[in-house]
Structure formats: structure tokens, C-alpha cells
Image: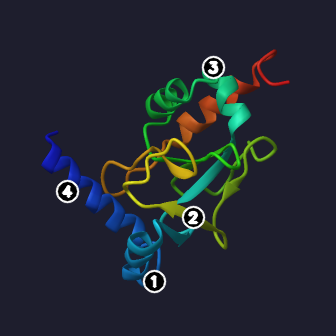
Amino acid sequence: MNEAAGKVAATAAFDWLARAQAAPQQAHREWAEAGFALLPLGSRFNCVLLPGRLVREAAGTTDHEAVTAMLAELLDGPVIYNSAQHAYYALVEPVDRWEYRSVAAMLGDGAYLTVPASDMRGPVGLHWAVPPREPGDLCGIEGVAALLESARRPGRLR
């Protein structure tokens, strides 16, 4: 995909995210003014809160770039990183059941997520570890489960 097409797709992806709010223009205004928008979860998407320690265990490294590359490959969807909390937020489709709640909370209906603007790429603060690529781009729930299973293998999580 060329750079111009990539920008159009990214804009469309953020338009799709903004429509999680009843007034999508509010999300665009928040991104423009503050660099972040508060979006409701549960209808358009949910998110899985992945503790940084768990993600680094699954990746087998503490190198931020290597962890990000692993997330991009395994989860194949958008992931937000909060360096102050050392936590990752994988955007996923809403699901009825989540069997990993003891290690990674599923945030959904009734919760809100602070979503960085498209140009927030880190490496510190709240930023996109893996930005959305197109409208409806979400992490596969199977990939999130595989990451959690990998981190839970004997000897991986202490």
C-alpha cells in the first residue's frame, strides 16, 4: 500500500473508531485538541487489558520494538500501550465469554477507553504500539488467547 492510500485507510479506521460515540465528531475534536478521545466500549469493540509483564513474558524479551513486532504479528490488530501503567490494550470484537479474566481483564459494556490520536506512536505515554489499519480492524480473539496461553506456560509466569 502506498503512503497516500495508507493515510486514507488510517483516516477511515479512526472514523470507524469515532463512531463508537453517539457523536463521532466529539472524538475527532478530542483527538485534535488533546491527542486522546474517550470512547465507550461494548458495542463497536471491547479491549483486553494485557499487563506488560505478561506480554514481555510471552515475547521472551523486554525490548520494546521486539515486543511490538510480536504483538503486530500475533494479534494482527490495533494495540494501545500505556507506558505509565506498563499495560497494553488490545482492541477486540465484543465477546460473550472471556475465560482469561484471572490474568487479563476484558473491558466492555459500561467501560470507556482512552484512545490516542493516529499520530501518537510513542515510545512513552499513551500511544499506539500497533495502530489500526482500516475500518473494523480489531485483534483476533484467538491471537489474544494464544498470547495469554504462551505466557501461562510453566516457567513463563512467576
Quote the CA–CA distance across marks 1 and 2. 16 Å
Residue 120's x, y, as percent? 43, 53
Q: Earlier in the sequence, mark 4 or mark 1?
A: 4
Give the crowd class for mark 3: few <14, some 14-19, many >=20 residues within 10 Å: few
Q: Hey, what amino acid is under mark 4? A: Val
User: 100 or 128: which is nearer to us?
Assistant: 128
Quote the CA–CA distance across marks 2 and 4. 23 Å
Quote the CA–CA distance across marks 3 and 1. 40 Å
Residue 119's x, y, as percent? 37, 54
115 w.r.t. 7: above or below: below
Mark 3 touches mark 4? (CB < 8 Å): no
Q: Hey, what amino acid is under mark 1? A: Ala
Of the residues tagged 3 and 1, which is closer to the observer? 3
Residue that carries the numbered disc 1 in the rendered image: 22
Residue 101's x, y, as percent? 76, 47
Quote the CA–CA distance across marks 3 and 4. 34 Å
Residue that carries the numbered disc 3 in the rendered image: 61
Q: Secondary structure at mark 1?
A: loop
Residue at image position (42%, 84%) is 23
2 w.r.t. 116: above or below: above
Residue that carries the numbered disc 2 in the rendered image: 114
Q: Secondary structure at mark 3?
A: loop
Q: Hey, what amino acid is under mark 2? A: Thr
Question: Which circle marks residue 8 in the picture?
Answer: 4
Residue at image position (57%, 59%) is 46
Q: Secondary structure at mark 4?
A: helix
